[in-house]
Image: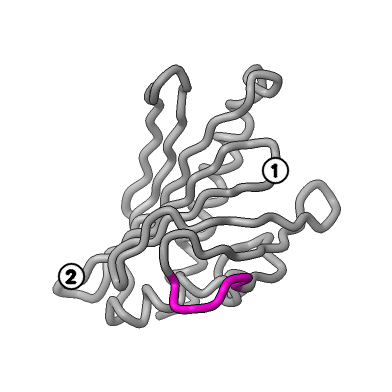
Amino acid sequence: MVYHTKETSYVQGNIEMHRIETSIEIYRYVGDVFDFVADPSNMPKWAPGYLAGEWVTKLPIRIGSKQKRVTNFGGGDRETIHVVTQFKKNSVIALSAITGPLVIEEIIETEKTSLGTSVVIAEEITAPLLLKPVEWIFAAMAKKNISAFSESLKKTLE
């Protein structure tokens, strides 16, 4: 069960950003949870709409590592490339989409708790000027998606 969902907007430089996050508690060891979510090949198992994922750079994961993802979007398959912008084993992995019309930063944070692992899944979204009038639609979609991701992740790992 999702126990926390939060949506905020803020300005970074001249750009308005939307941050949507959910938090869940998973009754598993933090290392197991982190390794599972950091592996893009597991995305179809816990992230509805994702069909495939793979690293396109050699492991180990580090800042600058790239992964390819395939999603079903708008009735067709869509391939995107994401680059790691933050990484600390068993703690945080952040990736930025480098293909597509939106600027999306995805952050997954894990922390050991007395019951297992706290997981925060967040997306920070901004649209280019041309898409600004409908940016709220993308934010609403992200909110729906990360809530579904959190619930699916918990069901998959417990």
**Range of residues picked out in magenta:** 55-61
Residue 16 marker: none
Q: Type of residue at label 2? A: Thr
Q: Is residue 56 magenta?
A: yes
The residue at the point 54 percent across, 42 percent down is: 104
Residue 28 can be seen, yes or no: yes
Q: Is residue 105 magenta?
A: no
> Could you classify mark 2 by the number of other residues whose Cα lies within 10 Å: few (under 14), some (14-19), or many (20 or more)?
some
Residue 30 vertical position relative to residue 24 in the rendered view, above or below: below
Residue 46 image offset from top left, x and y in percent: 55, 70
- Residue 55, quarter of the rendered image: bottom right
Q: Type of residue at label 1? A: Gly
- The foreground one among 11 and 60 is 60
| Left or right: 138 in relation to 149 | right
| Left or right: 101 in relation to 12 | right
Picture quarter with the C terminus: bottom left
Name the element at disc 1: loop
Name the element at disc 2: loop
Residue 24 can be seen, yes or no: no
Q: Alpha-carbon distance for marks 1 and 2? A: 36 Å
| Residue identified by numbered label 2 | 113
